[in-house]
Image: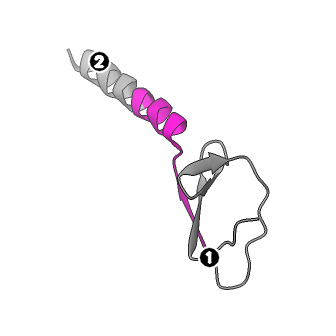
């Protein structure tokens, strides 16, 4: 079992946790003193980027 230290990051879209270089589905109980933050796992960041591109394209098209 990996020792949890420092700041732990969870994907704000799918809820996976970053443990080292991997993103895993897990229920974690964070020990006292460990900080928690949100971020995006690689698959979810690509989905969000594409959604933002689509929104931008729609706004540009609506202005024409």
Give the SS element for disc 1.
Answer: loop
Q: Which mark is residue 34?
A: none
Give percent across and percent down for residue 25: 73, 46
| Residue that mark 1 sits on | 5
The residue depicted at 64 percent of the width and 78 percent of the height is 34
Front position in the image: 10 or 57: 10
Q: Quadrant of residue 37?
A: bottom right
| In the depicted structure, whether residue 10 falls above or below residue 4 | above
Q: Is residue 48 magenta?
A: yes
The residue depicted at 47 percent of the width and 39 percent of the height is 45
| Residue that mark 2 sits on | 62
Front position in the image: 57 or 13: 13
Query: Between disc 1 and disc 2, whose residue precedes?
Result: 1
Q: Quadrant of the N terminus?
A: bottom right
The magenta region covers 35-51
In the picture provided, is 42 more to the left or to the right than 12?
left
């Amino acid at each position: 079992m990996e020792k949890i230290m420092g700041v732990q990051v969870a994907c704000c879209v799918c809820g996976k946790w970053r443990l080292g270089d991997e993103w895993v589905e897990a229920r974690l109980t964070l020990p006292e003193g460990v900080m928690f933050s949100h971020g995006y796992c690689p698959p979810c960041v690509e989905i969000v980027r594409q959604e933002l591109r689509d929104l931008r394209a729609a706004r540009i098209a609506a202005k024409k």
